[in-house]
Amino acid sequence: MVDSKWLQTYREEIRTFSGKIQEFQEGKLDKKDYKGCSGGMGSYAQRDAAKHMLRLRLPAGRLTMERLKFLADTVEKYQVQRIKLTTCETVQLHDLGAEQVPAIMEEAVSCGILCRGGGGDNPRNVMCSPLSGVQRGEAFDPSPYAAAVTDYLLSICREIHMPRKLKIAFSNGADDSVHSAFRDMGFRAKADGTFSLRIAGGLGAMGHRMGVLVDEAVRPREVLYYVKAMVDTFCQHGNYENRAKARTRFMQDTLGPEGLKEAFLNHLEAAKAAGGLEISSLEAPADLSKGSGETLDHPRAVPQKQEGLYAVKYHPIGGVLPVEKPGELYAALKDVPGAECRVGPDETLYIVNLTAAEAERILAVTEDSARTAFEYSVACIGATVCQQGIRDSQGLLRSAVTAVREAGIPDGALPRITISGCPSSCAAHQAGAIGFQGGVRLEDKKPQPAFRLFLGGSDALDAARFGEAGAVILEKDIPALLVELGRAAAAQGQSWEQWSESHREDLNAIVAKYA
C-alpha cells in the first residue's frame, strides 16, 4: 500500500481540487480546464455541469467488506441517486454535488479507495479476472500482482507525464473478460507459473489493435520491471502532439510491431539493470476452509475451485446498481467469513467464497439480476449523463430488454450485446458478438439518433477478434431488429452462435431491412 507521505500529498491534492471544483461551479473555470485537473482525481462534470461523477478505483475490482460498507454508508449519508459498475472494474457515483465530491474522496481513504488517477492521462484501474483465486481451471491467481502493480503506479503517477492513459489487465488464464489480448498491457497467467504479455492493444475511434506479443515467460515477481518498461516506451515514443493518436496502440503504426517489441525490450533490459523493482512480498490468500459439503444448482451460482464454495453472479441491467443494494448486500454478508464482492468488466458483480446456504441467501438478495445471456448486455452510462456521449446507451438497452422480454425470445437466441454511446468504446462494442456505437443517420436530410452495428466480435479466451463495422441503424429500430434476429435463431432451434454462423445470408437480409 502507498505510504503516509504519499497519502499526505494526496490529501493536499484533494484540498486543492476542492477549490477547483468550486471555481468551476462559480463559472471561474471553463469545462476544458476543469476537465484537465478533475480527471486525474477520478472525477468529471456530467452533461448537466451542476452534477458530478466520482470514480472509485478498485484494484482488481475488489469490493471488500470494508469497502462495501463504505459504499453503503456513503449512499445513505450523501443520498446518492445513481451508481454505475464500469467495464474497468470500478464503481462510479453519479449526480453528486460539487461539495460532495472532495468529501467522499477524503472519506474513501479510510478503506483504501484512492481516486487518484481514476481518469485523465494516468495509469488507470488495474484489472484482473473477477474470479481470480476461486475460478476452476485458472492457471494461478494473478490478483496479488495486480495489487502490486497498482501500488507501484500510484507511487510514480506524479512523476511521469504520459501522452495519454495506460490500461493494464491480468487474466487468470481461465477467461479473458478483462481483454488482456488488446489492452495497453495484458498479462495472461500460464500453467507453468509465468505470464505471457501483450502490449499496445486497444480500442477507440481512431481504430483498434490486438496487442503485440512481447514475452511468453514473464516471471511474476518481475512484473514491475515490465510495467516500468511500458511507461518508459510510451513516454519516449508516444504521440504528444496529436491527442487523438496519443495511445499505445498507435506505436504499432509508427514503430511497426517488431520495432515496438525491440524498443520495449530495450527499456526492459535497462529497468532490470537498474534493479529495485522485484516483488518481495505478497498479500497472503484468505483461509477458505469452510465448505459445508452441501451443493447448490442455480444458473447464477458458480462452483469455485474450493470444494463446497460458490460465487454468485449479480448483473443489474446496464450495470446500474440499485442504490439500496450495497446496504442490502453488506447486511447479508458482514458476518460471512471470507466473503468479498468483485466488480467484473462485464458490469457484473461477483460475490465470492460462499457456502451453499450462504449463496442461497445472496441469490435471494439479488433476485432482480439479469437472467438471460442477452440481459447480461453491457452499456456505458450514455449521453444523458456523460459529456462525451452522443447517444443514450442505457435508454436503448432498457428498450431492447423490454422488447425481447415481451417477444418471449428464449435464452441463448440472442447474445450479450455491447453498447457504446460514442466512439470512445467504453463498452468495447468492437469485441461484442453484436455491438453498437452511437452516432447519427440522415433521414430526409435531418440527423437522427442512430448506432453503427458491429457483428462477429469476441473476447473469448484464445479467440479474441474484432467485429465488422456495418450498417447504421436508427435508434428507434434497434429493439425490433434484435427481436427479429432472436426469433430467426429460435425458429431454427439454434443458439445465436450457431445461427449467426450457419445463416449469415439470413442475418444480413434482416439487417438490410433496417439499414
Image (cartoon, rainbow, N blue to C red):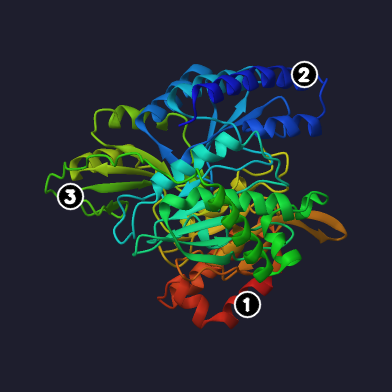
Considering depth in this image, is 453 or 473 the residue closer to the camera? 453
Dot placed on the residue nearer the N-terminal end, 3 or 2: 2
Residue appearing at x 75%, y 20% in the figure: 25
Q: Quadrant of residue 484?
A: bottom right
Query: Which of marks 1 and 2 precedes in the sequence?
Result: 2
CA gap, disc 1 and disc 3: 46 Å
Q: Quadrant of the N terminus?
A: top left
Look at the image and tell me in which quarter the C terminus lies.
Answer: bottom right
How would you rate the neighbour count of disc 3 (Cα within 10 Å): few for under 14, some for 14-19, many for 20 or more?
A: some
The residue at which mark 2 appears reads as 23
Amino acid carrying label 3: it is: Gly
Residue at the disc numbered 1: 508
Label 2 and label 1: CA atoms lie apart by 53 Å
Q: Is residue 90 visible?
A: no
Q: Give me the C-alpha separation between circle 3 and circle 2.
A: 55 Å
Q: Is residue 232 left or right of residue 239?
A: left
User: Would residue 330 appear left or right of 22 to someone viewing this image?
Assistant: left
Does label 1 or label 3 sit earlier along the sequence? 3
In the image, residue 484 sits, relative to residue 264, either above or below, namely: below
Q: Is residue 164 left or right of residue 110?
A: right
Query: What residue does disc 3 label?
Result: 308
Specify the farthest residue to the right: 445
Asked whether 200 or 396 is in front, the reply is 200
| Left or right: 286 in relation to 218 | left
| Element at label 2 | helix
Whether residue 173 is situated above or below residue 292 in the rendered picture? below
Q: Is residue 214 visible in the rendered structure shown here?
A: yes
The disc placed on residue 383 is: none
Q: Position of residue 232 (x, y in %)?
A: 65, 50
Report the residue at 36% width, 50% height from top.
Answer: 131
